[in-house]
Image (spheres, coloured by chain):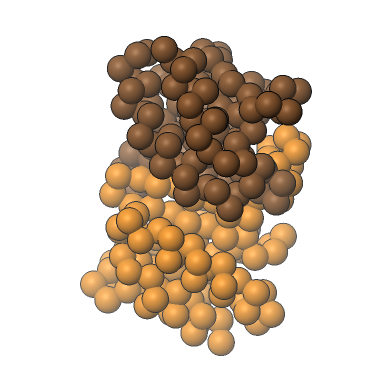
Chain colours: A brown, B orange
Amino acid sequence: MLAEHIEKIVAGTPGAIGAILMGFDGIAVVQHLAPGYEEVDIESLAMEFSFRITELRKAAQSLDMGDVNDITLRGTSRTLVCRVLSEDYFVAVVLAEPGHLGKGRWLLRSASSQLVEDL
Amino acid sequence: MLAEHIEKIVAGTPGAIGAILMGFDGIAVVQHLAPGYEEVDIESLAMEFSFRITELRKAAQSLDMGDVNDITLRGTSRTLVCRVLSEDYFVAVVLAEPGHLGKGRWLLRSASSQLVEDL
């Protein structure tokens, strides 16, 4: 079920390279890569940011921003959209074309509640 | 001139609490707060993230994401949109209503080149 949700996010997001569901401990639960991107090491990428997301969230809370559940890093070659699912898990979507960020983020948000249920 | 650009970003972004132009050393160049938000300590907020932005950018570069010039943290009570202007400076906009993120980001992006010229 989890794999299905992750696949749907990737398939439904134009420009998506892949998506991964990971714990904040850096352990991947499930991932899916778009055709042609099977070589991309999305696990290392998400792992690198898992700790940093936790740090950012702590800082944001101490600054009265509330719970930061949505973090976007738009790079010149790739964009990373992270959605926090719970205290323990997050989903990261990697995009090659930041132009389609809107839809990727929307899909990620609408899939979130389903993912939380299935975890 | 710089102050004018920052004011324009705040005035033109519905839900904007304020904007600040800051160096990555945490030293503020100019800031502007929307009416009713004069008490908000946007300087501390931006300072807290100035170092973290540098860290995130380094990580992103090592992961082949290219230059990350656009970072968004969407919190339950406030949203922070950061736009990197150069190796030394960035602009941060704080929003109370994340729903208007699109316009805030657009204004920030269109003002960026002008800000870089004026720095």
Seen in the picture, residue A35 relative to B36 is either above or below; the reply is above
Above or below for A15 versus A116: below
Toward which corner of the image does residue B89 lie, by quadrant? bottom right
For the C terminus of chain A, the quadrant is top left
Is any atom of residue B56 visible in this view?
no
Residue lying at 30% horizontally and 17% vertically, measured from the top left: A117
Name the residue located 60 percent from the left edge and 36 percent from the top edge.
Answer: A16
Residue A74 lies, with reference to residue A10, above or below; the image says below
Work out whether residue B40 or residue B112 is closer to the camera in this orientation and state it.
Answer: B112
Q: How many marks?
A: 0
Q: Residue at x 50, y 35 (%)?
A: A12
Q: Position of residue A82 (x, y in %)?
A: 49, 35
Q: Is residue A40 above or below residue B13?
A: above
Residue A99 seen in render: yes
Q: Nearer the viewer, residue B87 or B12?
A: B12
Residue at the left extreme, as displayed: B36
Task: Examine the image and state in which quarter residue B40 appears.
Answer: bottom left
Residue beneath the point at 33% across and 23% down: A114
User: In the image, residue A52 lies at what x, y percent?
Assistant: 55, 33
Residue A42 lies, in percent from the top left, at 65, 25
Q: Is residue B88 left or right of residue A69?
A: right
Work out which quarter of the rendered image holds the N terminus of chain A and state it.
top left
- Residue A71 pos. (x, y %): 48, 42
